[in-house]
Amino acid sequence: MADLLSIGLSGLSASKTQLSITGHNITNVNTPGYSRQDASQATRSPQFSGAGYIGSGTSLVDVRRSYSEFLTSQLRSSTSLNSDVKAYKSQIDQLDSLLAGTTTGITPSLQKFFSALQTAAEDPANIPARQLVLAEAEGLARRFNTVYDRLSEQNSFTNKQMSAVTDQVNRLAGSIGSLNEAIAIAAANGKQPNDLLDARDEAVRQLSGYIGVTVVPQDDSSFNVFIGSGQPLVVGSTVAKLEVVPGQGDPNRHEVQFISGGSRQGITSQITGGELGGLIRYREEVLDSTMNSLGRLSLAVSDQINTQLRQGLDLKGDVGEALFGDYNNEALAGLRAIAFGSNPSLNTVTPADASLKITETSALTASDYLLEYDGSLPSGYKARRLSDNQPMSVQLDAGVLTFADAKGRDQGFSVQVSGAPLVGDKFSLQPTRRGAADIKATLNQADQLAFAAPMRAESELQNGGTGVLGQPDLIAGPSPIDKTVLGAANLSFDVTLSPDGNSYSLSDPLSANWSYVDAAGNAVTPAPSFVSGSTNTVNLAYTSGGETYRFQLSFGGRPQTGDGFSLSFNSSGVSDNRNALKLVDLQSKQTVGVTVDATGKTISGASFTDGYGELVERVGTLTAQARMDSEATGSILKQATDNRDSLSAVNLDEEAANLIKFEQYYNASAQIIQVARSLFDTLISSFR
């Protein structure tokens, strides 16, 4: 009877445990990361009898969880990838709406400004039309400022979000470290603490949603967790941490530092995956380049408009004033070059500092640069363009550094370093980053808009031929022009017809300081001859005070020998709109990102509208790609989740069936005990 009772008791114990495990599964059906558990049973060692071996019941061997390291790892990596894409997409969606919006973008303001210029050019003496130009210029500047403010807000949000994410990373890393310790202790008896393992797997999965991780299991059942390029975030129960701090090269651009013990390491560029990786990727791929492209466009607009205005005359006959503010003042130049906070010279009496001035807006790129003092000859500096990581050639002349790429193309800016730099000093150069923030309309007098050209041409009334001299076009010269110099630049010349009457030449030599030149500005001697009866181009240069003014004008018709023509300062050009038309032409002129060949010929470039259009197109393309990536990674994550759940998740129907099965098992085991008791009672009764 004792054997039968022992068998019944073992079944009763096993069924009770199975019921407990089933109940544990059911109550944790909604617990994140929980893996369904089951118990494995085995027969006890049988006992030998004369008739053979007789079983002695059952025992529980192990309580296991339904778990696959492969499926869990797949879910972890899918979570990291999807979180990266979601963070990236949430930011770029906002940017795309901002730049492409009909009320928030730059294009509508550009079109309104040039439309106002066109209206004013049709009646250059009309004061209300001129005032409209000033109003639209102010609106354009404010639109640039507003878009920059939105981009700056996104940058600030990115900084704050990076801090919030690293806080979560540190919290989860601490939790994983604590679980590692508890698991190692609990697993010392050779059995796995299933619930602790599930809690740790879920913590690692959540961590992968914030940052990409690599997990390495250890012999003591603990996990080592690595991030970036192999930085150990969790090793057993030892936990490092992350901290977001202002950037060394740009305090407005926060960086992530890895802190382990007393050492710090910057790992921003090494972080991939998770929400943190998506934010950093968006900032590097989209936000920085967008701010730079927008700044380059605003610099080009203010430079080209100001330059053209200062090559014309206003209603009072004075040289034109700038419409937009000076982007090269000392304060703005100082903001474009930032000394690193770790520079060796900062600890000296004369720390090195730098300022950056724009020299040619059409040559600017949409990139930042890194300048480093290494004491090497000839300049002592080396530089790198960060957008493509290309080294720059650095030239030092009279204390001013200029930069060129491998093809010798000027980068459009110069840098002046003050103080005493030491080897290892670094400077972050941002030629265009703040361009859209700093543009401002400064002209407030409508009559100071220079719509008239500086020189005019006239024919003598007594000319006998039909020669027609076009109005001179200033194609090259200083900005602003010198009214005193041009006021003395009067030129008169006569026509000499060839004997056959088919060609003619003009006076040679010309008046003092005047000369004939070709289209490139090279002197032409002797004086060129022109075909009578056709339209010819005359190129003239006037040099005075170290400056050269180049003019181009047309000469047509059939002049006669002795016919006279003259050029003089346009002192009363109230109704002259030639400079205004040049301003209008800037809308379609290639002035942004211009590339020229060795002869100075433009190879590529974009107009204001096209330059902004390229920016919008690029952001739009990246946005569309991010949306597709979001759908794809979301589908991959769902598949990985379903695969894991198909093995590990709790199925209530299955557990309900198990409840019935194990309840019957329990009842049957109890019945065995009841039979053993009845037999024992019968046996005892027989001896009474």
Image (cartoon, rainbow, N blue to C red):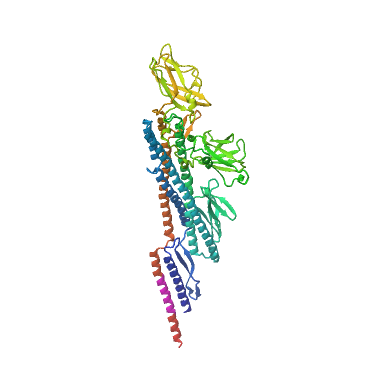
Count of all numbered marks drawn on residues in the image = 0
Q: Residue 576 in the image: x percent, y percent?
A: 40, 28
User: Which one is nearer the viewer's eye here, 643 or 482?
Assistant: 482
Residue shown at the point (44%, 22%) measured from the top left:
567
Residue 282 is situated, as x and y percent measured from the top left of the image, at 46, 47
Is 538 rendered above or below residue 149?
above
Q: Which image quadrant: the C terminus?
A: bottom left
Q: Nearer the viewer, residue 30 or 87?
A: 87
Observer-nearest of 265 and 72: 265
**Residue at x 43% of width, y 70% of height:** 19
Looking at the image, the residue that sits furthest to the top is 499
Prevailing SS of the magenta stretch: helix
Residue at far front of view? 316
**Residue 221 visible here:** no
Q: Which residues are magenta?
A: 662-676
Examine the structure image and report whether residue 671 is included in the region drawn in magenta. Answer: yes
Q: Is residue 94 visible?
A: yes
Q: Position of residue 358 (x, y in %)?
A: 51, 37
Q: Is residue 455 above or below residue 387?
A: above
| In magenta stretch: residue 484 | no
- Tell me where residue 260 sits by quadrant: bottom right
Above or below, 266 relative to 12: above
Q: Is residue 552 above or below residue 280?
A: above
Closer to the camera, 397 or 146?
146
Q: Position of residue 637 (x, y in %)?
A: 43, 53
